Image: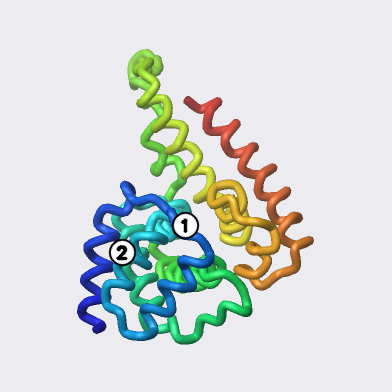
Amino acid sequence: MATAAAGAIWNVTGAVCSNTITGSLDSDYTIVERCLSGDAAAWEDLVRLHSRRVYGLCYRFTGRESEAQDLTQEVFLRVFRALGSFRSAEGSFGTWLARLTRNLLIDHYRRTRNERVTDSIEEQLPGIEVRSAAGGASAPRRPDSAVAGREASELLQAALAKLSPELRETIILRDLQEMEYREIADVLAIPEGTVKSRLNRGRAELSRLLKKYREAV
């Protein structure tokens, strides 16, 4: 059973960017019940329904695709081990999953803290032009919209990386994952008022950073 579940995780998360979230609360509950009853196919359904959201959380928190993919796989392995502790009366499966993902990301952040100490945020900005040593002129920017969209995403990711983990996770859950305040409060185990306070501070800091990076381009 564990081998089948792990195989489903690897197969589905390998194509995570093309997945869509189509499950409802009722279907989540049904799939969880099937998983707990030993239905091996249910594990693949569970991963397919929720892998995109988990990957999004991991990517926005780490800023690295390969790292986010590895963490997504690790999240679902934890889900496999801990699913028996899920209680539908205590909240939705999505909230439970977000809380589990957040706990793993905190562990990962602590494990890799020393590796990031010397990282300069400017070095993580592939969209910023390099000025020539001779004339100091900026390299011309390609005008196509795809490049512009990619650069905007890179700037956003770089700015998110600069926020404190507390502000970053609140921004990600509310503005990127579009979770309700009460759901975020459940995931972070803090009052809704604290969620709103962190969100306001995070948005203000994110806006300041984005303005700074855009002026540097």
Question: Which of the two residues, 101 or 33, is positioned nearer the viewer here?
Answer: 33
Residue topped by disc 2: 70
Secondary-structure class at tag 2? helix
Q: Residue at x 31, y 84 (%)?
A: 38
- Point out the residue furthest to the right here: 193
Residue 115 placed where, x, y %?
38, 63
In whole angstroms, how far apart are the C-alphas of marks 2 and 1? 12 Å
Between disc 2 and disc 1, whose residue precedes?
A: 1
Residue 183 placed where, x, y %?
64, 63
Taking 113 as reference, is 194 left or right?
right
Residue 63 placed where, x, y %?
41, 51
Residue 102 visible in this rendered orientation of the protein: no
Numbered badge on residue 23: none
| Vertical arrangement, residue 2 with respect to residue 140, above or below | below
> Callout 2, which amino acid?
Asp
Q: Residue at x 70, y 56 (%)?
A: 198
Question: Which of the two residues, 61 or 98, is positioned nearer the viewer here?
Answer: 98
Q: Residue at x 41, y 61 (%)?
A: 50
Q: How many marks?
A: 2
Image quarter hosting the N terminus: bottom left
Taking 34 as reference, is 168 left or right?
right
Taking 61 as reference, is 187 left or right?
right
| Vertical arrangement, residue 56 with respect to residue 93, above or below | above
Instruction: Locate residue 77: give its quadrant.
Output: bottom left
Residue 165 placed where, x, y %?
57, 60
> Callout 1, which amino acid?
Leu
Residue topped by disc 1: 57
Secondary-structure class at tag 1? helix
Residue 85 visible in this rendered orientation of the protein: yes
